[in-house]
Amino acid sequence: MIDGGEAIRKLALNVARYTGLAPLAKPFIGGIGAILMLHRVTATPEKPDSVNRHLNIAPGFLDAVIADMKASGYAFVSMDEAVERIKAGGKGGEFATITADDAYRDNMTEALPVLEKHGAPITIYVAPGLINGTADLWWDVVEDVVSARDSLTLTRPNGPLTIDCSTPAKKLQANARLHAYLTSEVREEDLQAVLRDLAGSNGVDADGPRLRTLMSWNEIRSIAAHPLVTIGAHTINHSNLKRLSETDARHEIGAVRDMLQAELGEKPSHFAYPYGYASAVGCREVGFVRDAGYTSAVTTRHGVLRAEHAGFLHALPRISVNGRYQSLAHIRTMLSGVTTPLANAGKMVVTI
Ligand SMILES: [Zn+2]
């Protein structure tokens, strides 16, 4: 899950503004390849107007993106091969690898047929806690709570806070307020308990979103056996690692490998930082992931890959295929590399 907020809206505006420039600029600022980031892929989202709709694209759009990229010369490769190509400085031509976070069931039912059609590999990053129920898809639960009520009261140590959810505009504000509350005021360790309290006291089933939309272990085992699929690790409990102690962060990064091996029979060698933005991953976390022995790790920082990333295999940027902007022009512009420095204060090699 990524932040759907201001940064992405600003980037989209920049994309629109620089689209005409992209083809001219590509020879100078284009990278050696790109890691595409997906979450959900479905033609029939349960809530098409969801505040989380940036997390979903239609399978037809995925098909169009892959076809367009192939036509312009991209080879679609596995994450293992992407790492080899980065280490080789991009020799062998432009490449792309597809990733999807959180293990949504529609990755199997709606994305996989498109990937099979193109022979395009995918890495799916799994957080076992989201499958077992020791962590929640809290952003979907929050949306369910806000849409169910006209008003909410949070019980906080410094006094109760009442949030107005009576109109569509107030509901948008309430979602943003609850995101801020859960990701900065509530301790990371208490997130599930506080969320479940909030859901329970407002008549919402906190298990609903993950049971409805994520794969079961049987489904993950079945997709893991597919030749196009690699399973990666996404911590145990989809934790914001920066908000945890060193001991807890190292446990979330290390023990998830054993849990996935126990369920799937194989230790994952690739990792995705939950949230992946600056307030969830920094130098400390990258060091922990390197120490744990992973081959690669991806953030949600925006950028194309460059040869220099051979030295930063545990802080690789991605290009988010964002559900709000399902246009080939946007994707082409982002792949040109023109938005990489724009979204990163002028940096061409984006790490953390
Ligand atoms: Zn995630």
Image: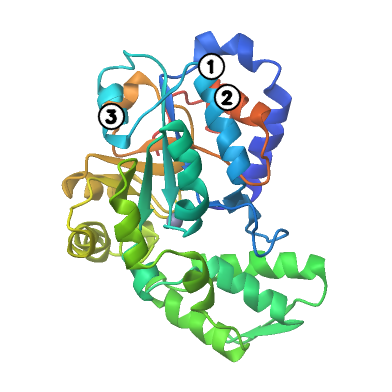
Q: Quadrant of residue 316?
A: top left
Q: Quadrant of ligand 1?
A: bottom left
Q: How is the image coloured?
A: rainbow
Q: Residue at x 80, y 65 (%)?
A: 169
| Residue located beneath label 1 in the image | 72
Front tag of 2 and 3: 2
Q: What is the x, y in percent for residue 247?
A: 21, 64
Q: Is residue 55 above or below residue 209?
A: above
Q: Amino acid at mark 1?
A: Ser
209 and 344: which one is in front?
Answer: 209
Q: Amino acid at mark 3?
A: Glu
Q: What is the x, y in percent for residue 142?
A: 60, 72
Disc 2 to disc 3, C-alpha distance: 21 Å
Q: Is residue 36 above or below residue 166?
A: above
**Secondary structure under the numbered disc 2 in the rendered image:** helix
Disc 1 to disc 2, C-alpha distance: 6 Å
Left or right placement of residue 174 versus residue 216 in this view: right
| Residue located beneath label 3 in the image | 81
Q: Is residue 161 above or below residue 328?
A: below
210 and 203: which one is in front?
Answer: 210
First of labels 1, 3 by sequence position: 1
**Secondary structure under the numbered disc 3 in the rendered image:** helix
Query: Answer yes or no: do the residues labelled 2 and 3 have beta carbons within 8 Å?
Result: no
First of labels 2, 3 by sequence position: 2
Quadrant position of the C terminus in the picture: top left
| Residue located beneath label 2 in the image | 68
Local packing at callout 2 (Cα closer than 10 Å; few below 14, some 14-19, many 20+) is some
Local packing at callout 3 (Cα closer than 10 Å; few below 14, some 14-19, many 20+) is some
Q: Amino acid at mark 2?
A: Asp
